[in-house]
Image (spheres, rainbow, N blue to C red):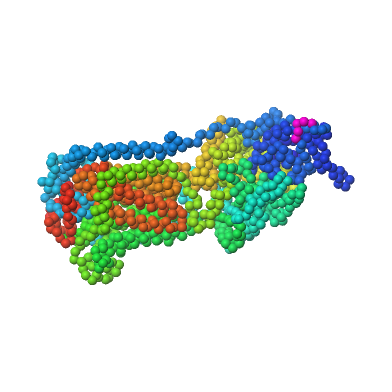
Amino acid sequence: MDANINLAANFLSRCPSCLDNLVKHFCEFTCSPEQSTFIDVVKIEKQNVTEYIDSIDVYITNKYLEGTFNSCNKVSVPSTGQLALDLMCGEWGASRCTPLKWFHYMGDAENNGYVPFQIRYINTDNPVGAFTPVDPIVTPCNKALNKNTPACSCVDCEASCPVPPAMPPLPKPFTILGYDGYAVTMIIVFVCGSLLFILSIVCFSNRKQIVARGEEVGRQVGRRLAAGLHHPGDGARIALAADQEDSPLQSKRSSVISADDLPSGFDEEEQSTFIERLGAGTDKLLAEFFCSWGTACASRPWFVLFMGFLFIVALGHGIKYIHVTTDPVELWAAPQSRSRVEREYFDQHFEPFYRTEQIIITSAGLSNIVHETTNGPITFGPVFNDTFLRTIYQLQEGIKGIVTPNNYTLADICFAPLTSPFTGPPTVSQCVIQSIWGYWQDSMENFNSSSNEDNYTVNYLDHFRVCSQNSYNPECLASYGGPIEPAIAVGGFLKPGEDLHNPSYEKATAVILTLLVNNYHDKSKLVPAMEWEKSYIEFMKNWTATKKPAYMDMAFTSERSIEDELNRESQSDVLTILVSYVIMFAYIAISLGQMKSCSRFLIDSKITLGLGGVIIVLASVVCSVGLFGFVGIPATLIIIEVIPFLVLAVGVDNIFILVQTHQREGRRPNESIPEHIGRTLGQVGPSMLLTSVSESCCFFLGGLSDMPAVRAFALYAGMALLVDFVLQITCFVSLLALDTIRQASNRLDVCCFMRGSKKDNGEEVVNGILYKIFKVAYVPLLLKKWVRAFVMLFFFGWLCSSIAVVPHIEIGLDQELSMPEDSFVLKYFKFLNSYLSIGPPMYFVVKDGLNYSDRGQQNLVCGGQYCNNDSVSTQIFIASKQSNRTYIAKPASSWLDDYIDWSQLTSCCKYFVSNSSFCPHSEYSNQCATCNISTINGRPTAINFERYVSFFLQDNPDEMCAKAGHAAYGHGVNYITDPKTGFSKVGASYFMAYHSILKSSADYYESMRAARAVSANITNMINSNLRNMGDTSTEVEVFPYSVFYVFYEQYLTMWPDTLYSIGISLFAIFVVTFLLMGVDIFSSVVVIITITMIVVNIGGLMYWWHITLNAVSLVNLVMAVGIAVEFCSHLVHSFSVSVKTTRVERVADALTNMGSSIFSGITLTKFGGIIVLGFAKSQIFKVFYFRMYLGIVLFGAAHGLIFLPVLLSYIGVMSRRGRTRGLHCANRARNEFRGEERGPHTPLLQNDNNQFPTTSYASVNSIDATTDHHVTF
């Protein structure tokens, strides 16, 4: 009896009243002089001449049974996170245990190997015949047995728990009258805004108001002209030139009029403001610089190209030093982020979490199994088919036999917790394999064994049912010596909404094999594991292809598989990316040329020039990557895949503007080709500078992000755009000069050594089809009165609808999207989501600082007797009872509680007599002695605590010493042993629990948020108590850790990070636009408004197209801000410098000239390339690149070519006074060029019959070479 009571004490001694209640009835029927009144001897057996009792009936009251059960049903086992009754109630487990079932199991000699003879408990409160039920006194668990023994702790007795603090209410969704509040608000805003807009249109339609506004316009234009024409050099003659499109900073749309045409009220003395003169000076300075620069580069094209080549080679050399980051941890978590710091601390102190190899196996076409038992029929899931399980056994044995090319086996790398210096090197049988076959010790013989009970067959199904309820049953321990967690070994047994409090493991629909492999902070030690995992994956692929039966389906993975598949994914879509770029290259090369006639197609084409421009774009990416290779900032796959796309988008726009301006701007008489190109660059260079600097600043400021992937992308992109701009105003200008010389020499494109059959004697401008469509059809239609009104209402409604849904964008990244569609890991993710029935393990780490040998500080941590009601263990226990909010499924294991219990068992602690060192309690009995640990109130004294804590952490558990700590805590407690005294001081340690089942991204990051809240409370509790104890110098930190935290921390602050990144990008664009557009506040605001609308509407697209918000989409949103500049800046500035009379006319002027370049440049180029991305195998490419890029281009074009012109037609400022437009290039032209002199190289455009005749900047800037006068307006 003493041995059995000690066995029970292993689990119940934490709660003195529980153990005392249970022992009382044993004492009664063993020692009571009144045994005969409540015990009936049922069966007597005889062995030789000795008779012995084989079966008895014990009459006992319901009051005692229920009281004892209630005092014990919450007693925990810290090392396993389970309840004691999970291990002591047979097949029922704690969740389905009742007083009768518990006592029945304790007396069941057949199913309980620790029962000496059959004991049948008969519960009754009244006498039965001659028998009166025994009724021992029961002490509730929250009551102390006596003055020297405390009540049970909160962890073991819910009645002892303090009232838990009320959880803060869950945030309620924003609603109005039961409907989504954002939607209702935006509907109201849209209706009110639309009514006001329509009302304003109707009111301002009054003719008198229009006349009054026209008179005001006249006065404004007059002031503008006064600022420009009242100049000593206004005698310079001005030629009229073509109605052409050009860059926003130097638009070629201008007006000059004679004095006779000036509006009434014109005051020649009216002066410009200081801001306008400052803006004019900025324009002039930039124009003159780019004119001189372009002429210089075009004059020495081969020298410039050679220097550019050296520049590219020099920077590109840094690529050899570049490090491409593929580790997801380094991609998404900053080194200084909390999750990375805590992960690093955990890995350094406890070694990283195990490497996991897992296989999920389901049945295909098999039916459920109905098994007849003495308790009635029990339905088992189809995976319990014996043939199915035998096949799994064969698979498992095959995996255990894998040998790598370098002869590494599973034994060389596996986690074997029960091995020690006393057991020798690990063998495969000692490796932890969480498999259903562990219940039969991986033995086919044990699996096949069966018996007959009351005409019912007892077989492997009954054995599984017993083991699933008590995995610590000695008959259920796996071959490695430890338990098999049923929630890990099988899956699919929980219905939606169910948890593990009352599991029916027999209904499982999946069998799971999990192999744990040692992980190391030192990466060099992982070589054997990496090699074995590679062989394991090859084995699994071969087995599923050749040996998997038709009735089985499976998914598998290894620790290295995700990174391997990400690398394969990036390589598999190389062809898709290349096709995308080839389409864009081909379009650029073809579209740049002017098709005058078929005979001159190869002469007028720009294939070589277009390819040169594309090569320059790619070279800029190479330079950026090389530069940061020198600096040491690692690259990512996102950079390699996305930045060429981004730089090409910006570079193409600049290429089209520069080339088309040069084509449409005829060369003047006696003007050399370099001077012509210089004059062209003088016109478009400021525009290129505006967009390039705006976007570069946008991305460089995005580099302030803490997220490594976002930061690296922003820095690489910003530098690539700057380098691209430098190369375009140098190398591309030189290429343009060479191409112009070729064309002037009548040589064929590509085959420049061949001349054309005839020479073109004229250089007339041929406007493209898109230009004509815009001028004749699109612009007049768009600017009709009610069309404009409809456009404003439509885009306003679109914006409101996007704002309504943007707050509902889901945060996170579905891990399934990260894998290619043909990946075996993708299938594993799907199986994992469907069948896994337990959450990931998590740890509460208590950093170094506590003195665990001090009883007061022990009470801050432990969960047993005398421990504080707000201790570490107690707070985690209480949190586990609110798993729907805390996501903690089980109470944490506690090494301190188990050490205290272990120290009280005399059979556990032993030492070698020869040297007083640790001795395993189950071995070397002749050489070892019992420790005889002295205790105070059941705890080791301070000296004994430090003397024997290392023994506890080296001792392997078994049925006689279940609390030994080597298996559960060997890696979880840091300690330093003094070699002189042998005493050990405990440092950092962890308390392991499990998260509840986590399905969605929200579950993952909310579980981390909740765990951090719990750890913060624990940290505050410990430090406040230490201060109360007089220890003001010690600060102890407690933090939660789980292997997935580092990946999901970004989502805790995803919205603030997103708003910050986009906001700072918009701010950068505003500042740069304001400065480079001549301190024009209106133009800057309009650009920012339009870009903001584009980004918000892309957010709406993300909601409707199921694109989640994460680091990848954040990169795309920042990129969208940069690309949107190309759709807005050109048009806004072209409008701002136009001198047409009304807003509508100025918009028509700007849109006609700029619209076709925007459409043919960035829009069509990117659209063709994006479509190809839709055929990529990578789901990330399809979702985050194809969908978002398509949205960026289409939404950018829609806002830039439809909304923005209409907006400007309503709210655009009417004039910009005092803007100097001279380009001091006449000193290079060396000719006197007048409007009435129409040379063959200077085509003129007809007057557009507007109020004022129009001319290009090229003509405005005609200068008398001798007087060097320039014209202002």
In the rendered image, the residue lying farthest to the top is 147
x and y percentages locating residue 993 in the rendered image: 59, 42
Foreground residue among 706 and 1166: 1166
Foreground residue among 55 and 936: 55
- In the rendered image, is residue 1159 in sight? yes
Q: Quadrant of the N terminus?
A: top right
Magenta segment, prevailing SS (helix, strand or loop): loop
301 left or right of 381?
A: left
Residue 1117 forms part of the magenta stretch: no
**Residue placed at 54% from the left, 49% from the top?**
833
**The residue stretch that appears in magenta:** 123-127
**Residue placed at 13% from the left, 58% from the top?**
1237
x and y percentages locating residue 1233 in the rendered image: 14, 57
**Residue placed at 40% from the left, 51% from the top?**
1188
x and y percentages locating residue 127 in the rendered image: 79, 31
Residue 125 forms part of the magenta stretch: yes
x and y percentages locating residue 124 in the rendered image: 76, 33
